[in-house]
Image (spheres, grey):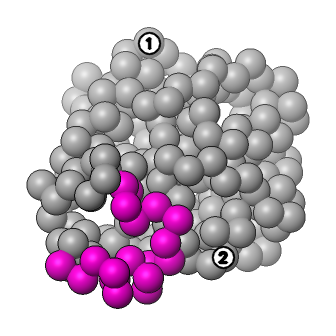
């Protein structure tokens, strides 16, 4: 019995365009992001979802609501699907973070699993454990069903590594575009990657930066 999960990164925000770290800060979609959300919703009209989940942050909620309205879905919001908490890096651009916190940025860039962002941030390992737990719970709850999850770039990074068994610290060699479709599955053998970064419905989508 296999659970199929369609993972969607939220549409573009102004801070995505500025290459600014959002984390748990609540940033809405920009005009392009709203257009992307509608395009993604239209691309999913042929799919039947037994359930739909979303991060509770506005950028994910707006994307999820567009899909739910198009596909007639009831949404459940779960704060465990939020982006990684970037602590003191939040609201800074990647260049600003590198300049202000050079030693910390190096550990972030190297994907050190034990590095914790200053001022209340999460380590990559703690973040991954959070995402593993919520994905396992959703898969168990919806055995032999198809589920939609709208979330964030960092979450998709963890989901891809979970389904391909790639370590947290290895450099990312896959894209995570805004509003693209990403499919994974779970059965008694574990997680599998089905399809990734499907974006035929999008005119343009920004990739998540590799070290995020």
Point out the frontmost of discs 2 and 1: 2
Binning the other alpha carbons within 10 Å of mark 1 as few (below 14), some (14 to 19) or many (20 upward) gives few
Task: Answer left or right for 131 relative to 32.
Answer: left
Foreground pick, 4 / 168: 168
Residue at x-position 73% and y-position 45%: 63
| Chief secondary structure of the magenta portion | helix
Q: Does dot 2 land on a helix, a strand or a loop?
A: helix
Residue that numbered label 1 is attached to: 141
Query: Does residue 8 lie above or below 211 as drawn?
Result: above
- Specify the label residue 17 is tagged with: 2
Q: Reply yes or no: does residue 13 show up in magenta.
A: no
Query: At which x and y percent is residue 150?
Result: 60, 41
Residue at x-position 85% and y-position 51%: 38
Task: Answer left or right for 103 relative to 6.
Answer: left
Counting residues from the start of the chain, the first of labels 2 and 1 encountered is 2
Q: Does dot 1 land on a helix, a strand or a loop?
A: helix
Q: CA distance from mark 2 to mark 1?
A: 36 Å
Foreground pick, 105 / 100: 100
- Image quarter where the N terminus lies is top left
Query: At which x and y percent is residue 107?
Result: 18, 72
Query: Quick check: can you spot residue 167?
Result: no
Residue at x-position 71% and y-position 69%: 14
Q: Reply yes or no: does residue 99 show up in magenta.
A: yes
Query: Does residue 115 lie above or below 8 as drawn?
Result: below
Query: Does residue 27 lie above or below 138 as drawn?
Result: below
- Image quarter where the C terminus lies is bottom left
Query: Residue 97 occupies which quadrant of the picture?
Result: bottom left
Point out the stretch of residues depicted in magenta.
Answer: 86-103
Residue at x-position 53% and y-position 26%: 78
- Specify the label residue 5 is tagged with: none
Query: Residue 185 occupies which quadrant of the picture?
Result: top left
Query: At which x and y percent is residue 124?
Result: 24, 53
């Amino acid at each position: 019995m296999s659970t199929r999960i369609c993972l969607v990164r939220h549409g573009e925000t102004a801070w995505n365009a500025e290459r600014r770290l959002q984390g748990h800060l609540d940033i809405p979609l920009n005009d392009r992001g709203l257009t992307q959300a509608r395009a993604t919703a239209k691309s999913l009209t042929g799919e039947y979802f037994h359930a739909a989940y979303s991060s509770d942050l506005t950028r994910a909620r707006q994307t999820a609501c567009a899909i739910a309205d198009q596909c007639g879905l009831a949404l459940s919001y779960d704060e465990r699907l939020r982006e990684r908490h970037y602590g003191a890096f939040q609201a800074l651009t990647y260049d600003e973070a590198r300049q202000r916190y050079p030693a910390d940025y190096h550990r972030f860039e190297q994907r050190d699993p034990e590095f914790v962002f200053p001022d209340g941030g999460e380590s990559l390992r703690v973040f991954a454990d959070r995402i593993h737990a919520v994905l396992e719970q959703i898969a168990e709850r919806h055995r032999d069903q198809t589920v939609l999850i709208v979330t964030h770039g960092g979450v998709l990074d963890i989901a891809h590594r979970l389904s391909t068994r790639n370590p947290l610290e290895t450099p990312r060699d896959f894209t995570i575009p805004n509003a693209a479709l990403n499919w994974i599955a779970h059965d008694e053998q574990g997680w599998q990657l089905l399809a990734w970064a499907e974006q035929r419905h999008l005119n343009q989508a920004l990739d998540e930066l590799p070290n995020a």
